Amino acid sequence: MIIMKMHSKELLYGLSEFYKIFGDETRLRILDVLLNKPLCVNEISEALDVSQSAISHQLKNLRSSNLVKTEKIGKNVYYAISDEHIKVILKYGLEHISEVM
């Protein structure tokens, strides 16, 4: 009998949900621009030419998925990539797609 180590269904479900967040072009564009430096909603909106309400909506999704974090400076809330894991995932994904193109 072959014994294989398998991850739990719950863990794999969580991974599936995690990767779903990358399935939206606007969210990916937001993450891409945040790779450079933390930005506030209006700066992201201007950089991507997308309405502030649409950016705010997607940032809410990214925050709830722990992909971005916030820091309040004065009256502005700045968004940044939450940690190095997210940067690495984006880096490797972009490298892989670039090889195929």
Image (cartoon, grey):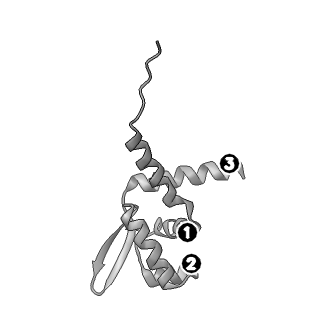
Residue beneath disc 3: 99
| Image-quadrant location for residue 78 | bottom left
| Image-quadrant location for residue 94 | bottom right
Q: Amino acid at mark 2?
A: Leu
First in sequence: mark 2 vs mark 3: 2
User: As drawn, is 73 to the left or to the right of 11?
Assistant: left
Please tell me the numbered disc located at residue 48: 2
Element at label 1: helix
CA–CA distance in space, label 2 to label 1: 7 Å
User: As drawn, is 38 to the left or to the right of 98?
Assistant: left
Q: Amino acid at mark 1?
A: Arg
Element at label 3: helix
Tell me the residue at 38%/67% (across/down).
63
CA–CA distance in space, label 1 to label 3: 19 Å
Above or below, comparing residue 9 to residue 47 in the picture? above
User: As drawn, is 80 to the left or to the right of 89?
Assistant: left
Disc 2 + disc 1, Cβ < 8 Å: yes
Tell me the residue at 59%/67% (across/down).
25
Residue 39 picture location, percent across and down: 42, 76
CA–CA distance in space, label 2 to label 3: 25 Å
Residue 23 picture location, percent across and down: 56, 60
In the current view of this chain or complex, which residue is farthest to the top? 1
First in sequence: mark 1 vs mark 3: 1
Q: How many marks?
A: 3
Residue beneath disc 1: 29
Disc 1 + disc 3, Cβ < 8 Å: no
First in sequence: mark 2 vs mark 1: 1
Please tell me the numbered disc located at residue 3: none
Residue 58 picture location, percent across and down: 47, 72
Judged by depth in the image, the label closer to the viewer, 1 or 3, is 1
